[in-house]
Image (spheres, coloured by chain):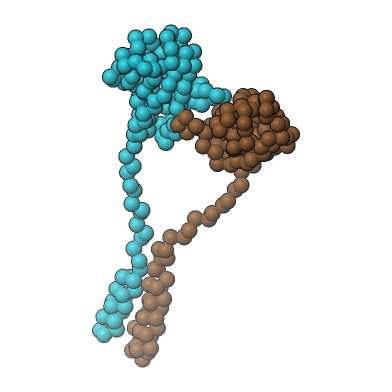
Chain colours: A cyan, B brown
Amino acid sequence: MTWRYTLLLLGALLTSSCGDAPTSPDTTATTPTTSSVVFEGTLEQDQSRFYAFNASQTGSVTVNLASLNLVGHREALTVPVRIGVGVPKGEGCGETQSIEALPALVSQFSTTLESGIHCVNIADMGQLPGTAIFLIRFSHH
Amino acid sequence: MCRRRSSKWGAMNWRCLACLCVVLAAGCSDNTPTSPTETTTTPTAASPTITEQFDGVVPVGGSKFYSFTTSTYGTINVTLAAVGGAFVPSTVMLGVGLGQPSGTDCVTTTSVNTAAGSTVQVTGNFDAAVYCAKVSDIGNLFAPASFSVSIAYP
């Protein structure tokens, strides 16, 4: 009977030495990050200004014209300007969507953008009485 | 194979044992994952098919840039074709670069200081994306300089 026990023991040892199947790599969930940007500068009559940014993934961009006033004045202007988003093109921003806006405390414009380089634009629509100082807040993924 | 025979009892059992060991050992599969075969393919860079002309004026100590979008992986060529203006010698060297728009500027990844000429001054192969060509004063200007830049891309 000894050989049977030896056989069983050897079999058990050999089968137990077979390694486990490889384990799958851990998957790490990525949380979309949102970047907030403050874009401020001066806007001259009949001119436009833009700010380029890189959206790391498809997601929404929200834009808020937070302030607009003439240089040397504290009062907010009551004439609208155009704010929009697009893709940098030539010497400006090739807007794909835009709205007319006055300064406000909340986001005035939101749209979905694919990943890549985009721009936020502000332009005078011919109503600025002089050079203005603007501040735009926007967020994107 | 492993029948009992009284006369050859011990020898046969050891043979059976050896056979079984071989079979069991062979049954252990190799669980070490094999590395995937890595195939490196070098994409072919498309030749420029679109040419745009970027004309402007560089202020003293300043810069100007021009954005464009390429549709596929390929070659971008930037050529400072001409420089001029009052008190600006046509041979003056300016900075010419290629990069991507960021913020209110063009962040260049490739640039040279060059005088105007007919040969391509900045070139490279790039993925499809938004890029910008930038012309800047590198400290040589005493007056604003007009310039003409040719940008060719796929």
Q: Position of residue B81 (x, y in %)?
A: 70, 31
Q: Position of residue A137 (x, y in %)?
A: 35, 25
Note whether B92 is above or below A92 in the view shown: below
Q: Residue at x 42, y 27 (%)?
A: A113
Note whether A97 is above or below A5 in the view shown: above
Return the residue nearer the eye: B26 or A49: A49
Q: Is residue B115 left or right of residue B27?
A: right
Q: Quadrant of residue A103?
A: top left
Q: Is residue B47 left or right of residue B33?
A: right
Q: Is residue B70 left or right of residue A7?
A: right
Asked whether residue A103 appears in the rendered view, the answer is: no
Q: Quadrant of the N terminus of chain A?
A: bottom left
Note whether A86 is above or below B7 in the view shown: above
Q: Quadrant of the C terminus of chain A?
A: top left
Q: Position of residue A109 (x, y in %)?
A: 36, 19
Return the residue nearer the eye: B102 or A95: B102
Q: Residue furthest bottom?
A: B7
Give the number of marks.
Answer: 0
Asked whether residue B38 appears in the rendered view, the answer is: yes
Note whether A117 is above or below B36 in the view shown: above
Q: Quadrant of residue B38?
A: bottom right
Q: Residue at x 57, y 24 (%)?
A: A90
Q: Position of residue B20 (x, y in %)?
A: 38, 76
